[in-house]
C-alpha cells in the first residue's frame, strides 16, 4: 500500500470513528484537561523521613527561592486515576450522571493531558462549565471546556484527538461499567 493509499485509509478510519462517537449520544462539552506540574503530585508520608533516611521526594523550592519542578512527570496511571476521581466528584457536584470519552496525550515536556468529550444527564442547564472547571482546577490544574457548535464539530474533535489515542490504547470510557448511553426516561441519580 502506498503512502497516499495509507493516508486515505487513515482518513476513512478517523471519519468512521468520529461518526460513531457522535452517534453514541449528544455530547455537551469538549475541551482539554491539563496538569499543573508545579503542584504536589501526592502525599509525602512522614515515615519516609524518619530514622535519618532522606526523603525520596525532591524539595519543591530551592534554597535560592526558585521552584524546583524536577524532571519526573506524572505517570499515565496516576493521571488516569485523577480523571476518574474528577468524573466521580463531578457526578456528585452536579447530582447527575456524566458519560465521557477521553483521549490521553502527552505534551512535549512529557506531561500527560486529556481531551474529553462529556455528556451530562439532562443536558446543560447553566453553571455546569463553571462547576466542572473549578473542580478540575482545584484538584489538578488547567482546563478549557466548551460547548460544541454541532455534531460535525464533535466528529472532527473525535477524529482529531480520540483516534490518536486509539492507536496506543489511551482512550478512557466513562462510566467504566454499563452503557455509555443514558436511558431516555427517568433520572439515573439516586
Image (tube, grey):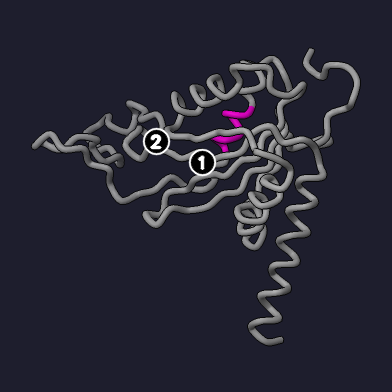
Residue 61: give x, y in percent of width and height: 19, 34
Mark 2 touching mark 1, by CB under 8 A? Answer: yes
**Furthest residue toward top:** 190
Q: How dense is the environment of label 1, judged by Cα within 10 Å: few (below 14), some, or many (20 and up)?
A: few
Residue 83 part of the magenta segment: yes
Q: Is residue 11 above or below residue 173?
A: below
> Farthest residue in the right direction?
185
The quarter of the picture where residue 169 lies is bottom right
From the image, which quarter does the C terminus lie in?
top right
Q: Quadrant of the N terminus?
A: bottom right
Position of 34 with respect to 6 (left or right) is: left
Q: Position of residue 98 (x, y in %)?
A: 71, 28
In front here: 152 or 188? 152
Numbered range of the magenta stretch:
81-87
Callout 2: helix, strand or loop?
loop
Q: Earlier in the sequence, mark 2 or mark 1?
A: 2
Q: Residue at x 71, y 81 (%)?
A: 5
Percent position of residue 12, x then y: 75, 67
Cα separation between marks 2 and 1 = 9 Å
Residue picked out by circle 2: 41
Number of numbered discs present?
2
Residue at (62, 61) in percent of width and height: 168
Amino acid at each position: 500500500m502506498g503512502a497516499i493509499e495509507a493516508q486515505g485509509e487513515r482518513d476513512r478510519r478517523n471519519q468512521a470513528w468520529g461518526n460513531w462517537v457522535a452517534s453514541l449520544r449528544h455530547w455537551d462539552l469538549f475541551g482539554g484537561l491539563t496538569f499543573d506540574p508545579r503542584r504536589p503530585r501526592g502525599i509525602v508520608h512522614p515515615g519516609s523521613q524518619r530514622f535519618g533516611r532522606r526523603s525520596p521526594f525532591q524539595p519543591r523550592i530551592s534554597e535560592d527561592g526558585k521552584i524546583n519542578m524536577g524532571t519526573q512527570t506524572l505517570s499515565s496511571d496516576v493521571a488516569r486515576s485523577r480523571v476518574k476521581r474528577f468524573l466521580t466528584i463531578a457526578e456528585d457536584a452536579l447530582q447527575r450522571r456524566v458519560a465521557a470519552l477521553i483521549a490521553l496525550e502527552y505534551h512535549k515536556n512529557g506531561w500527560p493531558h486529556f481531551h474529553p468529550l462529556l455528556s451530562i444527564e439532562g443536558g446543560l442547564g447553566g453553571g455546569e462549565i463553571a462547576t466542572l472547571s473549578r473542580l478540575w482546577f482545584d484538584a489538578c490544574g488547567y482546563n478549557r471546556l466548551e460547548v460544541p457548535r454541532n455534531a460535525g464539530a464533535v466528529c472532527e474533535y473525535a477524529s482529531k484527538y480520540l483516534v490518536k489515542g486509539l492507536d496506543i490504547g489511551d482512550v478512557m470510557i466513562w462510566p467504566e461499567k454499563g452503557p455509555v448511553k443514558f436511558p431516555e426516561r427517568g433520572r439515573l441519580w439516586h
